[in-house]
Amino acid sequence: MQNLLMRINFSFLLCIIAFSSYSNRSSLFDVIPNSVLDFGVGVGMNYGIFGTKTIIGYKGSGLLIGVGYAGMLTYEIGGQLSYKNLYLNLEYGVFGTKKYSSGSKKRYYSAAVFGGWKFGLGESKKIFLDVGVGYVFNDVNISVTPTWSSSSVTTYSLRSQTTGVLGLTYRIPSSGASRGKSGDSWYVD
């Protein structure tokens, strides 16, 4: 329970820090560049625990693919809907891994829903900070045999829980993007 509360507090702390960085801006909603591919690196279930997140679709809405590493290869697949800086995604994939004393490894799978904010960095908004909070739907029991006893088995339950994601993403411009007035940006007019 204490670990769950720490995760919730950490997720909300990340959101507060991210929103406070926008306090001196005139608008929280940025003009989003025209793109069909977003590629990022980060931590959290969207990113395959520790890894990459790719969104294939117009302006950040579309197919979500996460590939990462957490003691073994991890992956996620799902869909994401974006409206300006706000996003919501639904996915299925690895939410955790376990290495047993025998050397064997196991992946634990779950569905999850995430909501978050894409904080544009720089004038062109090609790079953004991805901060999100989500809910993982799971009901998994893990049996562990302590190394000092071969007969005693302890069972841990992983229940549904809140979690967070944090990443840095690059928007790859689509061919239909146009140059801005200054010639150094690629917003759609």
Image (cartoon, grey):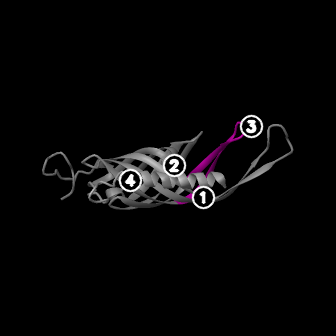
The residue shown at (43%, 46%) is 167
- The three-letter amino acid code for the residue at tag 4 is Ser
Segment tinted magenta in the rendering: 93-112
**SS at mark 2?**
strand
Which is nearer the N-term, disc 3 or disc 2? 2
Q: Residues within 10 Å of mark 1 (few under 14, many from 20)?
A: some
Q: Residues within 10 Å of mark 3 (few under 14, many from 20)?
A: few
Task: Give the overall secondary structure of the magenta segment.
Answer: strand
* Residue positioned 85% across, 41% down in the render: 150
**Label 4 vs label 1: CA separation?**
26 Å
Assess whether residue 106 is covered by the magenta stretch: yes
Earlier residue among tags 3 and 1: 3
Q: Nearer the viewer, residue 82 or 128?
A: 128
65 horizontally vs 176: left or right: right
Label 1 sits on residue: 161
Amino acid type at image mark 2: Gly
The C terminus - image quarter: bottom left
* Cβ atoms at labels 4 and 1 below 8 Å apart: no
Along the horizontal axis of the image, is 67 left or right of 120? right
Asked if residue 2 is among those painted magenta in the image, a careful observer would answer: no
Q: Which residue is mark 2?
A: 44
Label 1 to label 2, Cα distance in Å?
A: 13 Å
Contact between labelled residues 4 and 2, with CB atoms less than 8 Å apart: no
Type of amino acid at the residue the image marks with label 3? Ser
Which circle's residue, 1 or 2, is located before the other in the chain?
A: 2
Q: Which residue is mark 4?
A: 20
Are discs 3 and 1 less than 8 Å apart at CB?
A: no
